[in-house]
Image (cartoon, grey):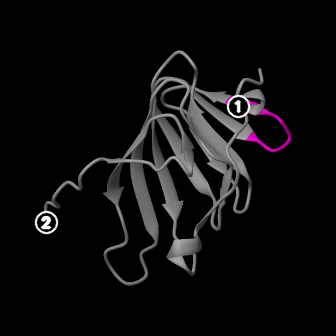
């Protein structure tokens, strides 16, 4: 057992995010066979991911604020603190904060066979898609 040093908070890249989004890595694989990656992600008002998918799906647990989670069919789910959203493997989606408030979630992802290709990043979310009711 050990206490791990806290990695520095990093600002997520504008190629994959709109607005200001920060990441604190909580857990990464440390032993053979482990695949889970857990991050604490904080979104400024109006900030959001680009469209993306994950090889093995993704679980988002909302900690603070109100999360918006969009699907390709135009549906935008609204998730509150304490709620958890699951996206299936390969499901294209986006997530972010409302225009008015910060949002924080824990993102839990399992690495795929090629960890570098676990997440497939696509185009930015249009303002029209983001503002759908």
- Of circles 1 and 2, the one toward us is 1
- The quarter of the picture where residue 58 lies is bottom right
- The quarter of the picture where residue 21 lies is top left
The percent coordinates of residue 49 (x first, y second) are 58, 43
**Image height check: is 104 above or below 111?**
above
Q: CA distance from mark 1 to mark 2?
A: 39 Å
Q: Is residue 27 left or right of residue 74?
A: left
| Secondary structure beneath label 1 | strand
| Camera-nearest residue between 59 and 54 | 54
The magenta stretch is: 71-77
N-terminal of the pair, mark 1 or mark 2, is 2
| Secondary structure beneath label 2 | loop
Q: Which mark, residue 61?
A: none
Report how many numbered discs are placed on residues in the image: 2
- Image quarter hosting the C terminus: top right
The percent coordinates of residue 121 (x first, y second) are 64, 58
51 in the magenta segment = no
The percent coordinates of residue 94 (x first, y second) are 65, 43
Give the residue furthest to the front: 14
Q: Residue at x 70, y 56 (%)?
A: 88
According to the picture, the residue beneath numbered tag 2 turns out to be 2
The percent coordinates of residue 36 (x first, y second) are 45, 65
Q: Is residue 93 left or right of residue 29?
A: right
According to the picture, the residue beneath numbered tag 1 turns out to be 77
Give the residue furthest to the bottom: 32
Q: Pointer 2: residues within 10 angstroms few (<14), some, or many (20+)?
A: few
- Image quarter hosting the N terminus: bottom left
| Camera-nearest residue between 108 and 22 | 22
Q: Residue at x 24, y 52 (%)?
A: 8
């Amino acid at each position: 057992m050990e206490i791990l040093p806290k990695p520095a908070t990093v600002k997520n890249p504008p190629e994959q995010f709109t607005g200001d989004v920060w990441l604190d890595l909580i857990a990464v694989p440390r032993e053979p066979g482990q695949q889970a990656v857990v991050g604490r992600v904080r979104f400024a008002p109006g900030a959001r991911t680009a469209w993306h998918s994950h090889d093995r799906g993704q679980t988002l647990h909302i900690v603070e604020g109100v999360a918006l989670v969009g699907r390709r069919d135009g549906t935008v789910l609204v998730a509150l603190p304490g709620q958890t959203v699951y996206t299936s493997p390969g499901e294209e989606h986006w997530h972010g904060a409302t225009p008015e408030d910060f949002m924080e979630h824990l993102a839990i992802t399992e690495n795929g066979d090629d960890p570098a290709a676990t997440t497939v990043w696509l185009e930015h979310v249009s303002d029209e898609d983001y503002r759908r009711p």
